[in-house]
Amino acid sequence: MSASRTERLLNLLIALLNTKYGLRRSELRQKVYHDTTSSEVAFGRMFERDKGELRAYGFDVETVTDKGWGSDDPATTRYRIGKESNRLPDVSLTPAECTVLILAAQLWEQAALGSAARNAVRKLQAAGGLVDPELPPGVQPRIRPAGQAFEDLVDAIHSQHPVTFSYLAGSTGQEEERTVEPWGLGSRFGQWYLVGHDRARSDKRFFRLSRFTSAVVVLEHQTFAPPSSFNVREQLAALPELPVRYAVVDVAAGALLGLRKHARAGGDADDTGAATPVPDCVDRLRVPYRDAETLAEELASYGPKAVVVAPPALHAAVRRRLAAAAAFAAAPFPPIDFPRSGPAKRTRKRTSEDQLKRMLQLVPFLVHNQGLHISEVAQRFGITRKELEDDLRILICSGLPEGYPDDLLDIRWDDDHVYIIQDLDLNRPVRFTVDEACALLTGLEALNGLPGLAEGGALESVTLKLMAAAGEEGLKAAAVAGPDVAPEDSAVLETAREAIRGGAQLRLSYLAPQRDAVSDRDVDPHRLYSLDSTWYLEAYCHSAQGLRNFRLDRIQSLQPNGRPVSSAVDPAGGFPVKLFTPNDDDAVVVLELTRQGAGLADDYYAERTAALPGGNHLAEVRFGSADWLPMFVAQHGGSVRILQPANLADATREWLDAALARYEDSTARQLD
């Protein structure tokens, strides 16, 4: 859709909203389209496309026929849109409800539904139903981005298109092509699952996203109808948890303290009971696990320090990840060419459809937020000042057909503060889209169980209000279910939270996996935040003399040390808290990401990105330490590799080759 079509659709919408009796097609052709050259047939096709576009935005284009005449006669048929068509109902929220709602929206920062959550919040602000909340001190939960497959599947679920993908079957260990009608997507046991109808098997199946071995392809020319009243959370609740099994793993003597914390010594026999010799300088451990792929991801990151002895399926899963990572690392490098300017984040190219949707949010937002600085308005909408000014210039040229100056949208920003004087009945935002309803309602559901939020009933009441406002789109939100964000150990979280409130210093004992050591530290706590149910404490570390992020499940002990906080360093304000605090001595690394790994650019806050032929991406990322990057590459098993600096790329290839060689040796010994 071109920019001229964007302007034409906006004028058509204003004309149809501001007519009581309706306008004939001939009147619209003359006054809105100013069409004098095309044939009646060609104009009719264009008009029908435009009506379909407005209906796609949710506006009900009514057809009014003169009495005694048929609706197929253009001369006697009129068109209009009711003023209440597709308008977001009034939503009045208490301060406590606003607090819960903003936390729910912020859950999706960096995740697939993040932009939809921001759009929904702007609509509530535009309707005047949302006040600036007072967020809980130091607590910011978030949902971990689940990669490109998540984004593609959410789009397919809401548009009801089938998908195809390659999948590693858990029952056979074989890679298979699947064609699935996606009904829902949700989190269970710390993993994301797709629930849908497998066409080849003619039955419902559950697919774990971490077992996808290819990109998701959406079959946009096909559609399907999901079961009525489908609720993915209910479906996943019936999914049985896998039984606990034990892996036999050989670990370098004295290494991998984190793994040892959950394992026990022994395991001199494999899972079949057959005894196997223990190599020198190695400790043999029995490691409990439920899912082989989850443990394989962890064990692959340990490289040559750990080798799976049994079971064979786990051994093969780790070896497969290492082999894929090694093969990708050894492939010829692409040219490294970043654009001189542009967004750092990997973003979808903006279209004129995006522009029209934004304009329909922009007018009511300005009505309820008069006098904001133009830079602040642009920041709220996530666009540049130039993009905003382009929007405003289209808006001020839009209005009633052949109207007087007072019949045009009147917006002024001469002094860099934006005021809207004439809104032409665009002063209320349109209803939530299914993505927007899904982002807010799924986020609210994920907050259940978070300490300090369930009390008072605000979580339940705001959910009911939003369900009523979202209508049918709210019912479709049941197709996506986020993870629970409550921490595993609420006592540690509460101790840290009390210290933040009271300005108390903490003494903690912490296991650092990169150094494979436990150290004692005095820290000044600043904020708590999460990715899913994994919680982090952002604090000033007096040992490191800088801001650090500590995973709560790696804290061995935590208690106040009796001193008040004393550092002068404060974290950057606002949301989100990042897992990484930039420093002057950071390692700047250029990565190549496959389409499966493209989400890592967002996860690690890439400073620059660029597309490569074939669908891969370049990403320039800062890392506080380069020591763990080989582990990072191995963990993602062929989805990411290091291109620069060259010495780090070489060292990573050598590390992967050494890890893979240990698995080859282990396989050979087992065959002997």
Image (cartoon, helix red, strand yellow):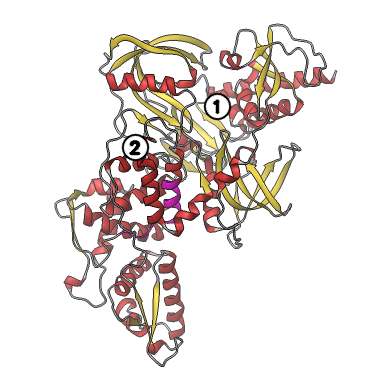
Compared across the picture, whether 143 is left or right of 261 comes to left
Whole-number angstrom distance, CA of label 2 to CA of label 1: 43 Å
Q: Is residue 602 magenta?
A: no
Tell me where residue 388 appears, x and y as whole percent.
28, 53
Quarter of the C terminus within the rendering: top right
For residue 102, what is the image quadrant? top left
* Residue farthest bottom in this picture: 68
| Residue 296, numbered circle | none
Residue at point 68%, 43% (across, down): 167
Identified at 61% across, 61% down, the residue is 224
* Image height of 475 relative to 261, above or below: below
Between 203 and 527, the one nearer to me in the picture: 203
Q: Residue at horizontal 22%, vertical 57%?
A: 367
Q: Which residues are magenta?
A: 429-441
Identify the secondary structure beneath mark 1. Answer: helix
The earlier-in-sequence mark between 2 and 1 is 2
Quick one: which residue is furthest to the right in this view? 672
Out of 97 and 19, give the one closest to the viewer.
97
Quickly name the residue at label 1.
632
Res 584 seen here: no
Residue 456 disc label: 2
Q: Is residue 147 left or right of residue 317?
A: left
Residue 479 is at least partly visible in this image = yes
